[in-house]
Each structure stands twice: as C-alpha cells, then as structure tokens.
Image (cartoon, helix red, strand yellow):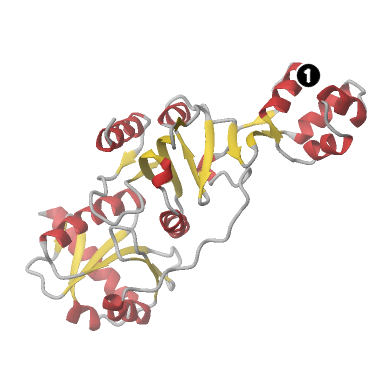
C-alpha cells in the first residue's frame, strides 16, 4: 500500500470514529501528517508504512507540540523492518506511542483499547495490583504460594501487587489461575504514561535567524514563543497574559504560492486544535488565507501588545468568514 493511500485510509477511519480531521500536511518538513479532534481528545498523527523512518528529531518535535497544544502525539504504521506490527500492541519510538491501523480501528471505532505494550525484553501488560492482591487473599494464598504457581520469586509477586507490570505469559497464567482478567488497558490518549517511563519534554530548538525579528516582536507583545523545525508553522506562541493562554500558530516568509499553501494548512490545523493562526509576510495584497491572518512585517512592529495582535488576527479571520 502506498503511503498516500495509507494516510487516506487512516483519515477515513478517524472520520468514521467521529473525529474532525485537518487537511493533510502535504508540505515538508513535517513532523505529523494530520491533527484530529473528538470532543476533548486531540491527537497529532504521523502515518508511516515503516516506522523505522520515524527519527528522534521528529519524535522530539511531536512531543513538544503535544505539550504546547495539549494533544497526544501518535504514530500509526504498518511494520518495523520486515515484521508487521502486531495487532492490539502499543510500541514506543522516541517517547511516542506507535501502533498499527488495526489497533487504531479497535481503539477508535470499537472502543477497545490495547492491553499489550512492547518494551525491551518482550511484550508486557498492566497488572491491577490491588485486584491481584484481593484475589490472592480471597484464596488465602501466601505470596510464596502464588510465586510457586507462577514460577517466579516471592519478591516478584510482591512487585506485581505494588504495580509492576508483567509479561504476557505471566498475565495469561494469572488469568487461568483466578479465572478473571487482572489487566488494565494501555491509556494511549494520555500518552501511555502509565506504562512508559515519563520523560521531560525536549527543549525548544533555536529560532531560525530569519525569524528572530518576528520572535522578538511577539515576545515583546507578551507571547512565549516556541520555535519549531519540522512543522507547517514556524512557532507555537502562547499569550502569557491571557487567563486562557490563547495559542497562536505563527509562520513567516515571503508571500509565495508555497507560503499560501502553508497558510491554508495552518488554518485547517488551527480549526482542529482550537487555536488561531497568523502568517507574517513582507508584503500582502490580502488580509487572510482561509482564516489565517496575514500581517506585514512593518505592521507587526507597530503592534505593541497581545491585545492588539489578537484583535488583528480575529478581525481578519472573521472578515474572511463573512465574505
């Protein structure tokens, strides 16, 4: 299957599941392919035939964007090396959850979350330690008795009851012993932090030298600017003086056909992520592109605070919607 067809299939599946899906980020460089929202669940999705193409720099960018946009970064892919991704198993690459389209279908369409995750050493599941302890005590088994049944140490059983996860083989043995499921699903939409060691959000990259003036003006106006290097926009800017922390996707370049295309993608992403978007240009013959406000560089210099910039962005977006 071609990557384009795979992106189309995943997009259609998410729409069937009730997600509002952005336009595809058909411009390079790009850390994610689509943004999608269902109620309060916002996901940024990278779609790959071979997940080995997902590198550390892209993983770091997606994790940063997840933090700034309050979204879950995900990779949906078909295989790793020459092996297909196993159904209902969550993998991890550079801190980002990865799974197959079948797993995505079960999660988003059927409402059945995956139970298994891959980690160094094999496949594992979450054990409900409190439930395990209750079941063991109901049978009046000691830690040692259960350890003997499982073929593990007494200390290992104690760790299971304290919350340590177990191999798939141990989980199946526990289910057979107690004739009850003792596992809990992988909470993918919370970044799967319950099974994956929490890592600090990677530091922001340095701003492109060509964007330093724009960053300076936005910072002076009261925005905290987070530069990007692999996204359709140059930065995610937060209004630090706004109680709701209004977020603005920002871009900057000459106004070319490519810039217009980028501005349209930014508008689509903004709609899904419930943010605003602004594109700074040297000269513009129009005020906006599909809801992305166009602001000339000289005009931006005259906007002295976030309220002024916010008003310009909203007025131009609303004006275009009204036409």
Q: Nearer the viewer, residue 18 or 30?
A: 30
Is 214 situated left or right of 135 in this image? left
Instruction: Tell me if I can see residue 149 in this picture.
Output: yes
Kindly indicate the quadrant of the structure image that contains residue 102: top left
Instruction: Tell me if I can see residue 41 in this picture.
Output: no
Kindly indicate the quadrant of the structure image that contains residue 262: bottom left
Kindly indicate the quadrant of the structure image that contains residue 141: top right
Depicted 147 relative to depicted 97: above or below: above
Q: Quadrant of the C terminus?
A: bottom left
Which residue has dot 1 on it? 178
Q: Position of residue 305 (x, y in %)?
A: 33, 79
Depicted 122 relative to depicted 217: above or below: above
Residue found at the very far left of the displayed protein: 285
The crowding category of the residue bearing disc 1, from other C-alpha atoms within 10 Å (few below 14, some 14 to 19, many at least 20), is few
Residue displayed at 26% across by 49% down? 25
Q: Position of residue 138 (x, y in %)?
A: 87, 23
Q: Nearer the viewer, residue 188 or 26?
A: 26
């Amino acid at each position: 299957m071609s990557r384009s067809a795979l992106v189309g299939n995943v997009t259609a599946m998410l729409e069937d599941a009730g997600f509002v899906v952005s336009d595809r980020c058909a411009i390079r460089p790009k850390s994610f392919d689509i943004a999608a929202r269902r109620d309060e669940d916002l996901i940024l999705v990278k779609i790959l035939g071979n997940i080995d193409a997902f590198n550390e720099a892209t993983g770091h960018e997606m994790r940063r964007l997840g933090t700034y946009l309050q979204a879950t970064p995900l990779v949906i892919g078909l295989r790793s090396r020459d092996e297909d991704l196993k159904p209902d198993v969550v993998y991890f690459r550079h801190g980002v959850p990865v799974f197959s389209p079948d797993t995505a279908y079960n999660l988003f369409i059927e409402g059945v979350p995956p139970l298994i995750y891959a980690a160094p050493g094999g496949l594992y599941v979450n054990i409900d330690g409190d439930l395990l302890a209750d079941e063991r005590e109901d049978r009046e088994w000691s830690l040692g008795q259960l350890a003997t049944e499982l073929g593990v140490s007494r200390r290992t059983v104690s760790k299971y009851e304290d919350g340590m996860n177990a191999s798939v083989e141990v989980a199946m043995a526990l289910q057979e012993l107690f004739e009850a499921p003792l596992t809990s699903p992988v909470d993918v939409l919370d970044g799967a932090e319950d099974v994956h060691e929490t890592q600090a959000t990677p530091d922001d990259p340095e701003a492109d030298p060509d964007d330093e003036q724009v960053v300076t003006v936005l910072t002076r106006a009261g925005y905290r600017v987070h530069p990007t290097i692999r996204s359709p926009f140059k930065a995610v800017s937060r209004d630090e003086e706004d109680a709701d922390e209004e977020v603005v996707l920002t871009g900057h370049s000459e106004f070319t056909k490519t810039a217009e295309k980028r501005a349209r993608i930014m508008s689509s992403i903004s709609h899904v992520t419930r943010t605003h978007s602004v594109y700074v240009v040297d000269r513009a013959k129009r005020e906006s592109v599909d809801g992305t406000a166009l602001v000339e560089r000289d005009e931006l210099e005259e906007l002295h605070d976030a309220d002024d910039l916010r008003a310009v962005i909203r007025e131009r977006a609303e004006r275009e919607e009204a036409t």
